[in-house]
């Protein structure tokens, strides 16, 4: 009986931690799609020498993604507050329902980000795509240095 209780408690703790992490990630940590499109375009223009037409296309893609995710970001804020409220009076049914909704919202947001970045990549010419690929490799290497063991990102 004690083993069953320990497993349930460990599983519940893990579920809440994963939900909280997914929520925090989806709400726009440093690499999300929630940044100011103008700032991102300026950075991309500087690094990839975007043409005026490319800048307009990228701006449209980023603005569209930001607008598409606006309601989901707001809902995640509400859910995060409700999850925090469960600390004192835990209701597993309610927590499971909120976790499931967070998962659905996160999936939509990840899909939207993937669709947006694919559109941006397709806007670039072959030389710019190669430069972007190189920049992303450098970014991953830099991220690895910040990891505790200094190793590469998990696959």
Image (spheres, helix red, strand yellow):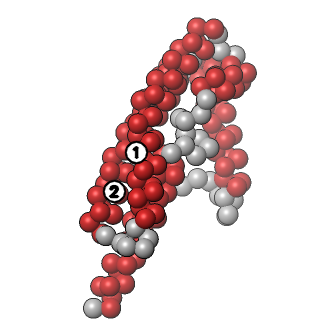
Task: Point out the tag, 2 or 1, that comes first from the N-terminus.
Answer: 1
Q: Residue furthest bottom?
A: 1
Relative depth, front residue between 24 and 82:
82
Horizontal and vertical percent position of residue 112: 42, 33
**Dot label at residue 115:** none
Q: Secondary structure at mark 2?
A: helix
Q: Residues within 10 Å of mark 1 (few under 14, many from 20)?
A: some
Q: Residues within 10 Å of mark 2 (few under 14, many from 20)?
A: some
**Dot label at residue 98:** 2
Splitting the image into 4 quarters, where does residue 58 fall? top right
The residue at 36%/51% (across/down) is 103
Relative depth, front residue between 72 and 113:
72
Horizontal and vertical percent position of residue 32: 55, 39
Asked if residue 22 can be seen in this view, the reply is no
Quadrant in the picture for the N terminus: bottom left
The residue at 51%/23% (across/down) is 63
Horizontal and vertical percent position of residue 113: 47, 34
Q: Secondary structure at mark 1?
A: helix
Asked if residue 38 can be seen in this view, the reply is yes
The residue at 35%/57% (across/down) is 99
Answer with left or right where residue 34 lies relative to residue 70.
right
Residue behind mark 1: 75
Answer with left or right where residue 21 lies relative to residue 7.
right
Splitting the image into 4 quarters, where does residue 154 fall? bottom right
The residue at 31%/70% (across/down) is 91
Relative depth, front residue between 128 and 13:
13
């Amino acid at each position: 009986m004690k083993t069953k209780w320990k497993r349930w408690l460990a599983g519940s703790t893990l579920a809440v931690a994963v939900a909280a992490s997914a929520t925090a990630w989806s709400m726009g940590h440093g690499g999300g799609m929630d940044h100011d499109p103008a700032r991102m375009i300026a950075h991309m223009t500087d690094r990839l020498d975007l043409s005026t037409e490319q800048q307009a296309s990228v701006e449209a893609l980023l603005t569209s993604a930001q607008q598409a995710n606006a309601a989901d970001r707001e809902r995640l804020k509400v859910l995060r507050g409700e999850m925090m409220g469960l600390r004192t009076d835990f209701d597993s049914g309610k927590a499971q329902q909120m976790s499931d909704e967070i998962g659905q919202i996160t999936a939509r947001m990840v899909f939207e980000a993937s669709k947006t970045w694919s559109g941006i990549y397709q806007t670039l010419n072959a030389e710019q795509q190669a430069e972007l690929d190189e920049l992303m490799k450098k970014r991953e290497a830099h991220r690895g240095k910040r990891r505790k063991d200094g190793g590469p990102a998990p696959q």
